[in-house]
Image (cartoon, coloured by chain):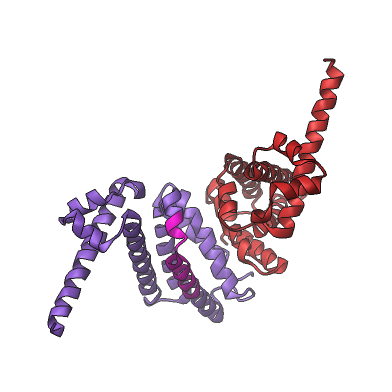
Chain colours: A purple, B red
Amino acid sequence: MPKLWNETIDAHRHAVREAILNTTTELVKAGGLRSVTMSQIAEKTGIGRATLYKYFSDVEAVLLAWHERQVTGHLHQMAEVAGQPGTPAERLQAVLEAYADIARQRHGGELATLLHQGEHVSHAEHHLAHMVQALIAEGADSGDLRGDIPPAELAQYCLHALTAAAGLPSVAAVRRLVGVTLNGLRPIP
Amino acid sequence: MPKLWNETIDAHRHAVREAILNTTTELVKAGGLRSVTMSQIAEKTGIGRATLYKYFSDVEAVLLAWHERQVTGHLHQMAEVAGQPGTPAERLQAVLEAYADIARQRHGGELATLLHQGEHVSHAEHHLAHMVQALIAEGADSGDLRGDIPPAELAQYCLHALTAAAGLPSVAAVRRLVGVTLNGLRPIP
C-alpha cells in the first residue's frame, strides 16, 4: 500500500481513539469511573460497538488508556507552568497549585486505586518529583528556599503534603494548603 | 456455672488470643504480611491448629485482629506522648515524630492496602486528626503556631506530609521531614 494511504489510516485510527477517550472524559465527569460502559462510549462517540471493540478489549482497557492520557496531560501542564517566567519560588508555587488542583479532583474507590497502580502513574510521579526537586534546588541556590535539607526530600514532603487537597472543601482551602506547604520550605531565620 | 469459672475461661481465652497476636507480630516482622500462615502461627504459639481455628476462621481474620491491635496500640502511644509536659508545639512535635516513625514502618502490597481499608483505620485516623488539631489550636492560642488557618486543615496537612516518611532511608531523614512539616505551621512574620 502507498505510504500516504498508511498515514491516512493511522491518522484516522488516532482520531477515533482520541474521540473515544474524549467521550470517556465526559462520562467520567458526569457519573464517575464506575458508571462508564462500552455501550455508552460507543453511542456517545458515534461509532458501533464492534468498532469500539477493535480499539479496546473492555472498559478497563479504555479507562486505563484514558487515565494515561490524563496523567500525561497533567504532567505537560505542570512542565509548562514550571517553565513560565518568575523566581524559582514563584514557579514552584505555580506547579504546586496545579498539582494540588489535580489531587483534589482525584477519584476515589477501587477502580481509581487500580488505575493509580499502573506504571504510568509511578513514572509520572517520578518525573514530577524531579521537576519539583529542581525548582527547590534553584530556590535554595538563590536563598529563597531552605538549603539545609536535600531537595529530593523536600520534593517528597511537598507532594505528600498536597495529597491532603483531596479532602478539602474549596479552592481557597487548597490555596491555603499550598501556602502552608511552601512555608515549610522557607529558610530557618 | 459459677461466675469465677466464667472469668477464668474469659481470662484464658484472652491470654490465648493475645499469644496468637504476639506470634503474628513476630512472623510479620520476620517475613512480612504475606508470609504468615495458620500452621506457623499455631506452631509458634504452641497450640494446635484446631484450637487456632476456634479463635480465627482464617489467616486474614488473624491479620485483621492483629492490625486492629497494632493501630489501637499506636493510638494509645500517641495519646500518651500528647499528654506529656511541654508547650503545645513541643507536644505536637513529639506526636508527629511518633506518627512519622509508624508511617515509615508501614508495610506495602495488596494485603497492607486491604488491612488499611478497614474501619478501624479510618476511626484511628479520625481520632489522631482530632488530637493533632487540638494541639495546633492550643499552639495557635499561645502564639507559637500560626492561627490564620483552620486547625483542622493544618492537621490534615501534617498527617499527609508525614506519609512521605514511608519512602525515607533513615531516622534522621524522618526527623528532618517532621522539622520541615512543623516549619509550615510557624506564624508568618
Q: Nearer the viewer, residue A39 or B136?
A: A39
A54 left or right, relative to A1: right
Instruction: List the single residue furthest toward the bottom.
Output: A3
Specify the quadrant that holds the C terminus of chain A. Answer: bottom right
Q: Nearer the viewer, residue A179 or B2?
A: B2
Q: Which residues are magenta?
A: A114-131
Instruction: List the single residue furthest toward the top.
Output: B1
A65 left or right, relative to B66: left
For residue B52, above or below residue B175 = above
Residue B107 spot, x, y in % from top left: 63, 57
Q: Nearer the viewer, residue B39 or A78?
A: B39
Image quadrant assignment for residue A2: bottom left
For residue A37, above or below residue A178 = above
Residue B54 spot, x, y in % from top left: 71, 34
Q: Is residue A128 magenta?
A: yes
Whether residue B187 can be seen here: no
Residue A53 spot, x, y in % from top left: 25, 58
Whether residue A187 can be seen here: yes
Residue at image coords 46%, 73%: A127
B103 left or right, relative to B149: right
Specify the quadrant that holds the N terminus of chain A. Answer: bottom left
Q: Is residue B125 magenta?
A: no
